[in-house]
Image (tube, rainbow, N blue to C red):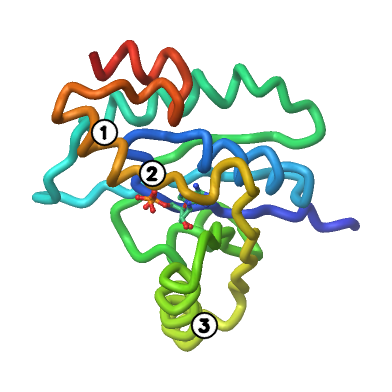
Amino acid sequence: MLMKKVGFYPGSFDPVTFGHLDIISRAAKLFDRLVVGVGIHHGKQALLNDETRISLLKSVIADLKIDESEIEVVTFDDLTVSAARSHGAQAIVRGLRDATDFDYEMQMFGTNHKMADDIDTIFLPASIETRFLAAKFVRQIAKMGGDITPFVPRIVADTIK
Ligand code: ADP
């Protein structure tokens, strides 16, 4: 029997940006099923509450109209490797923008691999159009009343407004 390839893409998605969507649509082409995991960190100061982050993600993913893969949005509050495994994923997907991401992601990969060597990590390089994009800047701009429409889908900008 052919095993379905499942990827687990974790993040805070606070809010989901065009950078995340770029990774999601490219990762969807590599896996039969892509599980997007919204990390729930109790006590962490977020711009959007969990429910809003999840419903926005679902809505903008539906708008991508991707047919080649099943994409599912889930929440998790346990270790990334545990969440990946419980969803049947063989690999964690992460985006790499720059050397700062690289250093952090390599450490995380090393740590995760020690804990769970059955789960691999796949890095996708950020696309040229979105590699400067970071959710933390979008949060700052939004808090200061700036225009975030260059960075996020319309529905996200409207919801934050
Ligand atoms: P951020 O790092 O923007 O605050 P997250 O913590 O939700 O967002 O990140 C989840 C994953 O998405 C990470 O692997 C991160 O490197 C990746 N990512 C975030 N923004 C981009 C982007 N603009 N291009 C490519 N990958 C990105």
* In front of the other: 97 or 16: 97
Q: Which residue is mark 2?
A: 38
Look at the numbered disc 1 and give the secondary structure of its residue. Answer: helix
Figure disc tally? 3
What's under tag 3, amino acid-wise?
His
Look at the numbered disc 3 and give the secondary structure of its residue. Answer: helix
- Mark found first going from the N terminus, 3 or 2: 2
Residue 58: x %, y % from top left: 49, 24
* Badge 1 vs badge 2, beta-carbon distance below 8 Å: yes
Look at the numbered disc 2 and give the secondary structure of its residue. Answer: strand
What's the CA distance linking mark 3 and mark 2? Answer: 21 Å
Taking the image as shown, residue 55 lies to the left or right of residue 130, namely left
Residue 84: x %, y % from top left: 51, 59
Q: Residue at x 65, y 23 (%)?
A: 64
In the rendered image, the residue lying farthest to the right is: 1
- Within 10 angstroms of label 3, few (less than 14), some, or many (20 or more) residues? some
Q: Which residue is mark 1?
A: 50
Q: Which residue is mark 3?
A: 113
Q: Residue at x 59, y 72 (%)?
A: 119
- Within 10 angstroms of label 2, few (less than 14), some, or many (20 or more) residues? many
Taking the image as shown, residue 91 lies to the left or right of residue 44, namely right
What's the CA distance linking mark 1 and mark 2? Answer: 8 Å
| Rendered image: mark on residue 20 | none
Residue 99: x %, y % from top left: 48, 73
Q: Residue at x 47, y 49 (%)?
A: 132
Q: Quadrant of residue 160?
A: top left
What's under tag 2, amino acid-wise?
Val
**Quarter placement of the N terminus:** bottom right
**In the image, is residue 161 above or below residue 109?**
above
**Quarter placement of the C terminus:** top left
What's the CA distance linking mark 1 and mark 3? Answer: 28 Å
